Amino acid sequence: MATETEKTTSTPHVADSHGLIRVHGARENNLKDVSIEIPKRRLTVFTGVSGSGKSSLVFDTIAAESQRLINETYPAFVQGFMPNLARPEVDVLEGLTTAIIVDQQRMGGDPRSTVGTATDANALLRILFSRLGKPHIGSPKAFSFNIASISGAGAVTVERAGQKVKERRSFSITGGMCPRCEGRGAVTDLDLAQLYDETLSLNEGAITVPGYKGGGWNSRLYIESGFFDPDKPISTFTKRELQDFLHREPTRMKIAGINMTYEGLIPRIQKSMLSKDKESMQPHIREFVERAVTFATCPDCDGTRLSEGARSSKIDGISIADACAMQISDLAEWVRGLDEPSVAPLLASLRHTLESFVEIGLGYLSLDRPAGTLSGGEAQRTKMIRHLGSSLTDVTYVFDEPTTGLHPHDIQRMNGLLLRLRDKGNTVLVVEHKPEVIAIADHVVDLGPGAGAGGGTICFEGTVEALRTGGTITGRHFDDRAALKDTVRKPTGTLEIRGASTHNLQGVDVDIPLGVLAVVTGVAGSGKSSLVHGSIPAGAGVISVDQGAIRGSRRSNPATYTGLLDPIRKAFAKENGVKPALFSSNSEGACPTCNGAGVIYTDLAMMAGVATTCEDCDGKRFEASVLDYRLGGRDISEVLAMPVTEAEEFFAAGEAHTPAAHRILQRLTDVGLGYLTIGQPLTTLSGGERQRLKLATHMADKGGVYVLDEPTAGLHLADVEQLLGLLDRLVDSGKSVIVVEHHQAVMAHADWIIDLGPGAGHDGGRIVFEGTPADLVTARSTLTAQHLAEYVGA
């Protein structure tokens, strides 16, 4: 009997044989027929140079197909309300489990979205205050800044026993929204002096808004409206005339025989300019908006977004506004001190959420912090919070560079969290460049060997030890360590910051040296960005390159974003004696079938939409007649299909010699984007590529001080060397470079280091060290110093 049992247990159950995720023939983006087997319930790190195809394999193939298959399990009715996901370009995908994607997409920039609303912590707090708050003011809605208080009364007709009876009904909803700012915490005012010159009449050009000058339809609308005398200075308008000029409701009228709608100047500007995204505006309009609109903290709610009633209800002297304004680590301590058996499960859940913030290194945030102000790394860690205490197992967690924005001290903590998720029986897939994270992997997949068209193949799979000797770019650079400089540059001047108190800075006085490479460092939340972006005096000639998302649709590409397409179009037009608009796929030259998109999108209602290459233009995006015009033997579609390095040679000399285009292409090569195709849609670029694209466009700006925010984000170990070379070239050309950075190679390469800390939030905001990297390593007085000393082997 015993031997029978042994036989049974020694044979593995067929259900346990599915231990691998199998990918066969993946061709998404630049992947070249990739086939791979990934172990389940292990931590697998995907690495490779920026643009080698990591995200295409992990996010666009494995995670995308998992999400698509989950969506297909819902009824057709529900699927009709969900985004349509196309099947990735892959032959076989087996062994998939439910994928939870934790990416670096910035959280919505909606002004009403805060850290508390994004993580459900606010929902728990609202219930807590509605139960325990004194005086009691109502349900949880009464504490929500997204719900307005409304009331109404009227007669309703009800049918009873075949008779229609009229009854008077009234209702009221108590919401927590501040009525003045409508729950935004800030009020906007228009500076009228920026809209018009009151000493002039309309005929003399009193309106100074862009697009309202010089006899166009916008100015004629006001001059010929008949509501006021256009020869009279605005300062002499009666109250009625000023009301009509600035605030009149839309009114239909005829001007020069054309039907038009007259509207007061202020609502007209609010609709045409202020409701639009500032980033997408033309520079002169953006400049006007920044000049004319003033943002001020709401005087009624003092920026808390909440009504007076919501602020009056308190628990132990603390209102919900006070709780949301507290640093989360302090709030967690306050919640731990509450002992109320009637809401014990609620308190336990709230405690767990707040302690997760502290554990993940975000204890320095507050719940009222707008979600749109979080960095990519902070947003990713905020999304992780809801998964930390999850009871789910056998799930695939997919992370996109979870160490972005983390100090080496915080990376160890992040590693612990990744291992904890794996040890619960989950498959953890991480796209990462940092050696500290690669080192904890059970399995490593290295893609490459190059970027763009030169990548898309598997160069290595196996253990970390085998990677070191594997001969790939990642393996060769895995143990690279930048050495401290023997000599540092001497500053040519200083940028003075006095009494800086933005966010958590505690009256910081610091002199940032100019003419050198200065690095600002410190743990996440210590006040680096507040010092560099919020405290540098205006007018210092500063060019700031941050990690904000690039605005652009699938029609945008590096050529349109950098302004490269303008000189190219002009060169084609001049060579062929036609107008430049013909060489734009968004204008006259567009293929009429696909409207210049190159593909035709077919919406299949509740099934996944399909994108097919346009048969008329064969994906070239231009009308056939446009492709007859050539420059240097190439047509416009062939030029847009060139990689940057090839295009740089093409426009450097010969028949296609175009200095303006060549200069822009040279800058793209300088920042390490030589492999990008100049017509590649912006939506396909990685985060690191987007930041370097921004840097390339700003390198032409007139300004002596460059401020870069973590330029190594998304960069492979091999690319960091190239970036250091670029920073050196910028400094040697007479520029001053200030870098906010956690990467030890950049710290070691610096001429001057400013270290903030010692901790995060209200434990930070002070300068804990200023000096050369060598002095920092010798002193070993801060967390940064200890990690840098370890890195350089001192």
Image: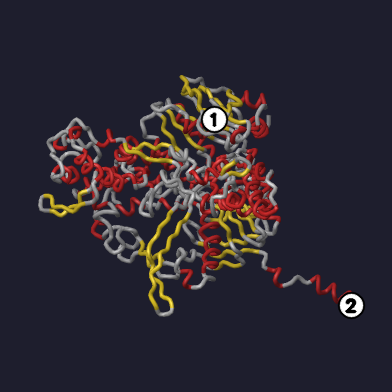
Name which quarter of the figure residue 649 lies in.
top left
Quarter the N terminus occupies: bottom right
Q: Which mark sits nearer the N-terminus, 2 or 1? A: 2
Residue, disc 2: 1
**Residue sitting nearer the eye, 177 or 49:** 177
The amino acid beneath tag 1 is Leu
Residue 277's tag is none
Quarter the C terminus occupies: top right
Q: Residue furthest left?
A: 257
Rendering coords of residue 213 (x, y %): 19, 39
**Residue sitting nearer the eye, 572 or 536:** 536
Q: Residue at x 75, y 70 (%)?
A: 12
- Under circle 2, the secondary element is loop
Mark 1 is surrounded, within 10 Å at the Cα level, by few (under 14), some (14 to 19) or many (20 or more) other residues, namely many
- Horizontally, residue 391 falls left or right of residue 753, namely right
- Under circle 1, the secondary element is loop
Q: Which marked residue is nearer to the observer: mark 2 or mark 1?
A: 1
Q: Is residue 128 visible?
A: yes
Q: Are marks 2 and 1 in contact (CB under 8 Å)?
A: no
Q: Residue furthest bottom?
A: 162
**Residue sitting nearer the eye, 789 or 346:** 346
Rendering coords of residue 329 (x, y %): 63, 41
Q: How many marks?
A: 2
Name which quarter of the figure residue 10 lies in.
bottom right
Rendering coords of residue 528 (x, y %): 54, 33
Mark 2 is surrounded, within 10 Å at the Cα level, by few (under 14), some (14 to 19) or many (20 or more) other residues, namely few
> Residue 493, relative to residue 375: is it above or below?
above
**Residue sitting nearer the eye, 408 or 134:** 134
Residue, disc 1: 505
Q: Is residue 449 visible?
A: no
